[in-house]
Image: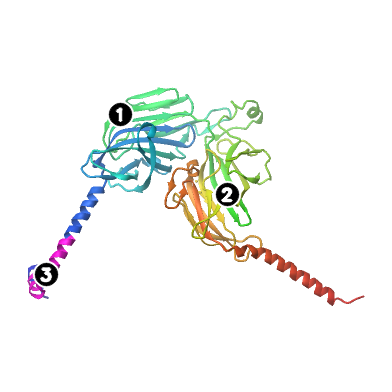
């Protein structure tokens, strides 16, 4: 085996190639080196290591007035490095990772009366130096933040199942007390120059709360801070024990079926498995005390919910396994319809109820035609029940299941949803169907009311957050399939009866 050194190979190439080829080879090598240096510098310029940023001021407001925890975070960040930064990182402690239902961010543009908020893209990311179990997210800036520049970010994140009842069981006459666990200072991968945390409770009854340096309480608000000069990933755990008698309404599973009929109607059917997720009820239930002393007997229970339905709703029904429930009230207005529903019995902690809500809508309000000839359904994704957490939703999204049943003959369906969902296709057979109807199934877990709201517009798809669009192609000829089938069937029946009548003997 002969091994040649690089110098020998170089000499051979020198004697083999022409001067023009050697010059081209040198130019190519210089170009490769230049591209490598340029790409390396580009990566350095737009990388956002924690050392490049610092948080000048962080103000966090935690709203505990409901069983859905809403946190509003304002961050003023500064680029202290020498290179532009294109992203800002957020970190969440492991106790909140599994309960994070929604995370949105926006950047502040302008000042005072001309101030506006521009939505930013948020994506999960991995940090090698993050504490065990911590989860990180990356906020992509509209324009890179140059050295010495500052930017103000507005962040909203929502936590579900984060209030722990204590005691875990209460009687009918007792109030509900819960625990909330968090930190007095934010968990951040950056150095924080100054920060303050405000916690607002539903009432002034606060049994206890962790007292650390710079802690103050005024009425229903607890203030932690201001704290200055905190290094990255600093953490100071706190616990707040307070009264919360709001309805802990949790839909363990919701299956919404939207059936599209090109004859002009949109039929919605919603199957609910509702539970009270607060402190479990112990002892006996007294209907007399509940009705005679509503403010003393069962203050943490709930007996009615509000469903916000689209305008021009019709043919509304509300029933359970026993039958129709008449204790509901529908108020229709020009822009909305409110359905107030009452289960057959009030719900205490640990109690459950199952029921079905159905209604019809004009198809022209939700079905449109795109410029390429396809049709698309533009409809609200989330749960219509106000202040409700949905563990499982299927729009067949807890999971919610959402089912969109398209007319027979529909082809090439595709769903455009402004947040991550699981989706697949199924086939459903209804009356007089031959080939079956295509069903677009969307599933999502941990759904909150903000999934049902308009937050931003995705410019490429023109889709509002909280709405989803289902595109498909449909040949109008298929609308005649079932009428022709019925006409043909009756025609053959009549012809057969005439034939049998002519062949029957006369007596």
| Name of the residue lying farthest toward the top | 218
In the image, what residue occupies the spot 8% across and 73% down? 12
CA separation in Å, label 2 and label 1 = 52 Å
Query: Do the residues bearing badges 3 and 2 touch, measured as CB atoms within 8 Å?
Result: no
In the image, what residue occupies the spot 16% across and 59% down? 33
Residue that mark 3 sits on: 22
Residue that mark 1 sits on: 227
Q: Is residue 283 above or below residue 364?
A: above
On residue 365, the disc is: 2
User: What crowding class fits label 1: few (fewer than 14 Cα within 10 Å), some (14-19), or many (20 or more)?
Assistant: some
Q: Is residue 202 left or right of residue 297?
A: left
Of callouts 3 and 2, the N-terminal one: 3
Stretch of the chain drawn in magenta: 10-32
Of callouts 3 and 1, the N-terminal one: 3
- Name the residue nearer the viewer: 279 or 245: 245
Q: How is the image coloured?
A: rainbow
Q: Is residue 370 left or right of residue 146?
A: right
């Amino acid at each position: 085996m002969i091994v040649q050194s690089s110098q020998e190979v170089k000499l051979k190439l020198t004697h083999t190639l022409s001067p023009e080829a050697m010059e081209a080879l040198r130019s190519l090598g210089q170009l490769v080196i230049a591209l490598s240096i340029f790409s390396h510098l580009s990566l350095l310029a737009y990388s956002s290591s924690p050392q490049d940023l610092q948080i000048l001021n962080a103000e966090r407001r935690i709203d505990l007035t409901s069983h859905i925890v809403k946190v509003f975070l304002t961050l003023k960040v500064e680029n202290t490095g020498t290179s532009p930064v294109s992203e800002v990182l957020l970190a969440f402690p492991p106790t909140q990772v599994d309960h994070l239902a929604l995370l949105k961010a926006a950047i502040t543009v302008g000042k005072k009366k001309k101030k506006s908020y521009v939505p930013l893209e948020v994506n999960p990311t991995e940090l090698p130096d993050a504490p065990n179990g911590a989860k990180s997210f990356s906020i992509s800036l509209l324009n890179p933040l140059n050295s010495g520049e500052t930017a103000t970010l507005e962040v909203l994140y929502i936590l579900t199942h984060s209030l722990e009842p204590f005691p875990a069981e209460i009687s009918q006459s007792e109030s509900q007390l819960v625990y909330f666990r968090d930190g007095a200072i934010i968990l951040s991968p950056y150095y924080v120059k100054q920060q303050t945390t405000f916690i607002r409770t539903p009432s002034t009854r606060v049994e206890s709360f962790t007292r650390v340096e710079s802690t103050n309480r005024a009425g229903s608000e607890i203030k932690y801070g201001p704290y200055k000069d905190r290094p990255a990933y600093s953490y100071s755990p706190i616990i707040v024990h307070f009264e919360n008698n709001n309805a802990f309404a949790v839909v363990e599973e919701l299956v919404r079926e939207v059936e599209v009929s090109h004859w002009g109607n949109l039929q919605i059917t919603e199957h609910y498995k509702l539970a009270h997720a607060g402190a479990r009820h112990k002892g006996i239930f007294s209907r007399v005390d509940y009705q005679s002393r509503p403010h003393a007997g069962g203050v943490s229970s709930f007996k009615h919910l509000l469903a916000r339905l689209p305008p021009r709703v019709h043919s509304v029904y509300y029933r359970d396994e026993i039958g129709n429930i008449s204790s509901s009230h529908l108020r229709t207005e020009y822009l909305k319809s409110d359905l107030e529903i009452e289960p057959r019995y009030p719900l205490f902690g640990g109690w459950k109820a199952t029921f079905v809500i159905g209604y019809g809508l004009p198809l022209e309000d939700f079905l449109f035609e795109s410029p390429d000839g396809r049709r698309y359904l533009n409809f609200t994704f989330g749960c219509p029940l106000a202040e409700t957490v949905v563990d499982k939703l299927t729009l067949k999204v807890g999971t919610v299941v959402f089912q969109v049943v398209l007319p027979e003959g529909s082809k090439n369906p595709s769903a455009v949803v402004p947040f991550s969902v699981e989706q697949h296709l199924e086939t459903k057979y209804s009356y007089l169907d031959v080939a079956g109807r295509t069903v677009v199934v969307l599933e999502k877990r941990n759904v909150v009311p903000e999934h049902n709201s308009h937050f931003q517009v995705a410019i490429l798809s023109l889709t509002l957050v909280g709405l989803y669009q289902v595109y498909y192609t449909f040949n109008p000829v298929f609308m005649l399939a079932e009428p022709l089938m019925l006409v043909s069937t009756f025609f053959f029946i009549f012809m057969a009866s005439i034939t049998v009548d002519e062949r029957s003997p006369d007596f």
